[in-house]
Image: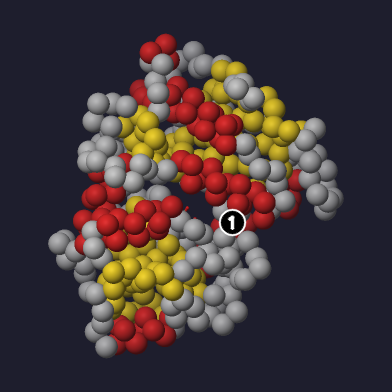
Amino acid sequence: MNYPISIEKVSYSRVHEVDFDNLLFGHSYGDHMFIADYYDGDWRDCRIVPYGDISLSPATTFIHYGQSIFEGMKAYKAPDGTPQLFRPERNQERLNISARRMAMPDLPKEIFMEGLNKLIELDHAWIPTKEHCSLYVRPFMFATDDYIGIKPTQNFRFMIITSPAGAYYSKPVRVKVADKYVRAFSGGTGFAKAAGNYAATFLPMKEAREQGYDQVLWLDGRDFKYVQEIGTMNIFFIMDDTIVTPKVNDSLLDGITRDSVIQLLKHLGAKVEERELTIDEIVTAYREGKLEGSFGTGTAATIAPVATYNYKGEDLDLPELSQDSIIYKVKSELEAIKTSKTEDPFGWVKKVKVDTEVV
Ligand SMILES: Cc1ncc(COP(=O)(O)O)c(C=O)c1O
């Protein structure tokens, strides 16, 4: 092992304080956290320590300039109790895609995977077993130079924390199509999971919520014409018996759920198109009665049907997807794969080995 991990365990687990029957998203955190620091040109001091506050200089670069990226994935338990992760290598690869765009160092795969596995092994009791629940895993990296000045940074920290999570959306989402604000534009950072991308969406989200919508659908940053993605989800439309999703470009996130859903849909024989898609095409399909439904995909929500799009002040209320729809089949198939209740023909699930000593 090039990057050994030291472990300091908690003396008392807080897991018994968690109400697993009433989990809210992002409210409680696992017993431990993983930390690695980058200085003198390499990653060092990989460690797992009790979850808790960290101390940083008020001059720390990321606080001022937003040089910070993150990932999100989920851990589940198989019926025999084995903890497992869903496509974690994709998160590892995407973290480094984000890191390169934000002038941060690549994180070696070994650190990501070993840190993740060891953390889940230690905190496996935090993985909820109730249906639709999981342990949300948040890896993140930020610049730690103690310097208020704009110059390339030399010091970084990578961390992983976990949080038991319940179901994300309980009902179909109401979505406002952005016609004033922009999330991303070609040449920018839209394809990276960069903290600032999210900060810029808080005001549009707040305004959308005040108007009775749950999420914002982003259009391209130049012409307000091409459909991109919803807040934290990729987006799909069912039109003319075809399932269409915007093709990945540098203004939207290459979602892991998006890719899994496309593969599953094709596996089940559905016609899927990844292409440029304009808001006018959606509105026309709606008016002609050809828009059969729409849904978002993301780690947090898995698949969330859309109830309404509000475009330029008009509510376009979508037909409700029938429970026999292929979309619900894909949703339950995906959830069954993640929890090993069905076979995983794609090799997506990665089991976490639990050493009896940590149980
Ligand atoms: C902006 C954005 N788009 C799409 C997604 C969906 O990506 P994934 O399926 O990998 O969670 C997310 C969530 O991570 C996101 O933050």
Which quadrant of the structure image shows residue 196?
bottom right
Residue 56 in sight: no
- SS at badge 1: loop
Residue 299 in sight: yes
Q: Tell which of 342 and 8 is nearer to you.
A: 342
**Quadrant of the drawing holding the N terminus:** top right
Q: Work out whether 259 lies above or below 320.
A: above
**Quadrant of the drawing holding the C terminus:** top left
Left or right for 358, reference 170: right
Q: Tell which of 51 and 347 is nearer to you.
A: 347
Which quadrant of the structure image shows residue 216?
bottom left
The crowd level at tag 1 (other Cα within 10 Å; few <14, some 14-19, many 20+) is many
Question: Which residue has dot 1 on it?
Answer: 192
* Residue at (54, 43) in percent of width and height: 92
* Residue at (43, 24) in percent of width and height: 121
Q: Work out whether 271 lies above or below 278.
A: above
Q: Work out whether 115 lies above or below 95.
A: above
Check the image and tell me how it is coloured. secondary structure
* Residue at (53, 28) in percent of width and height: 114
- Asked if disc 1 is less than 8 Å from ligand 1, the answer is no
The amino acid type, in three-letter code, at marker 1 is Ala
Q: Residue 166: percent from the left, percent from the top? A: 33, 42
Q: Residue 298: percent from the left, percent from the top? A: 40, 54
Which quadrant of the structure image shows residue 155?
top right
Q: Residue 278: percent from the left, percent from the top? A: 44, 81
Q: Residue 249: percent from the left, percent from the top? A: 54, 67
Question: Quick one: which residue is furthest to the left in this view?
Answer: 324
Q: Work out whether 99 lies above or below 19.
A: below
* Residue at (55, 49) in percent of width and height: 94
